[in-house]
Amino acid sequence: MSFYLTALLQGLCFAGIALGIYISMKIFNIPDITTDGSYTLGGVVTGILLTNHVAGYLILPTVILAGGLAGAITGIIHTKLKINPLLAGILVMTALYSINLTVMGRSNLPLIGTASLFTSISVVTDVNQNTLVILLLFVVAITALIAYLLKTDFGIAMRATGNSESMVRALGVNTDRMKITGLALANALTAVSGYLITQFQGFADINMGIGIVIVGLGSVIIAETLIGWSQITAVWLSLALVLAGAVVFQLVLALTLDIGVDANLLKLVTAIFVLIIVSLPRLTKTTD
C-alpha cells in the first residue's frame, strides 16, 4: 500500500509540470521543451538554498523567479528572434544543463540533515500522511490561483491568443507579451515541481529532468481524453482533471513496477502508455 502512496505523492509533486504543460501546449499550442531544464533548475535552486540554510519562505519565490526567467527567455527567443518555439525550448534547455551543473557544483546534491517543507510543517504525526496533507493543500492552492488567473481578463486574453492569435492582435493585444508571460508562468510551475520533488526525495540531481516533459504531456493527454468524453468546459474542472491525470500517470507506472516489469523498461512502458492515451480518442472515432 505504501508503494502506491508514494506514487500518489509523486503525482501531486508533478502537478506543477502538468499545469505548466497544459498552459504551454493546450492554451498556447507551443511544444515547450524548456520543461526538462526548468524542472531541474527548480530542484537545483531548492537544493542549494536548503543546504545553505536559507529561510524556507524565501526559497519558493526564488524558485518561481528562476523558472519564470527560463520560460521568459524561451518566449523572447521565439517571439523576438522569430525562432521556432520547439528549437527555442531546446536551446534554453541545453543551456540550462550547464547552468544547473555550474550552480550545483556537482552532479548530485544530497539534502541529508537539512530541513524541508515536509519536516518543517507538522499537520499529523504520520510522516506519509503529513506529506500528503501538505501536498494536497499546496496543489489545491496553486490550482485555485491558476484557475482564477485564467478567468480574469488577462487570462482570457492568454487563452484567446492560443485560439486565434491574428484576431487577438487585431483587437490591440500584444500577443508576443502574452506568449512570453505564458511560457514564464508555465516554467515557473514546472520549477515548483522541481522544488517539491527535491524535498520529497531528499536530493537534487543534474539528470532529474531528462524526459520529464513526457510526464506532463501524459498527464495533459489523460485530462484531454477525460474532458473530451465528459464535455467539460469549466476551467477549474479542466485543471482538476489535469491534476488527476498526473496522479493516474504515476499510479499506472507504480502498477507496472508492482506486477514485475523490469525497472530498466520503465521509460519504454511510459512511452507506450502515452502512445496508447494519444491514440485512444482517434481509435474510438474510427470505430464509431
Image (cartoon, rainbow, N blue to C red):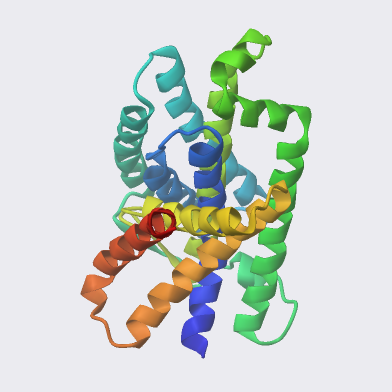
Position of residue 257 in the picture relative to residue 46 (left or right): left
Residue 221 visible: yes
Residue nearest the observer in this picture, 36 or 237: 237
Q: How many marks?
A: 0
Give whichever of 127, 59 is nearer the camera: 127
Residue at 69 percent of width and 45 percent of height: 146
**Residue 273 at x, y percent in the picture:** 35, 65
Q: Nearer the viewer, residue 103 or 179?
A: 179
Which residue is at a point 50% across and 28% down the rendered structure image?
Answer: 72
Above or below, 108 against 62 in this view is below
**What residue do we see at 62% from left, 71% from top?**
118
Compared across the picture, whether 251 is left or right of 166 comes to left
- Residue at the bottom extreme, as displayed: 1
Percent across and percent down for residue 135 are: 64, 67
- Residue at 55 percent of width and 60 percent of height: 196
Across and down, in percent, residue 20 comes to 53, 45
- In this rendering, is residue 124 above or below 235? below
Asked where in the image residue 64 lies, by quadrant, the reply is top right
Res. 242 visible in picture = no
Look at the picture and state if 70 lies above or below 248: above
Instruction: Single out the residue that lies furthest toward the front.
Output: 288
What is the x, y in percent for residue 115? 58, 68
Q: Quadrant of the C terminus?
A: bottom left
Q: Is residue 220 left or right of residue 96?
A: right
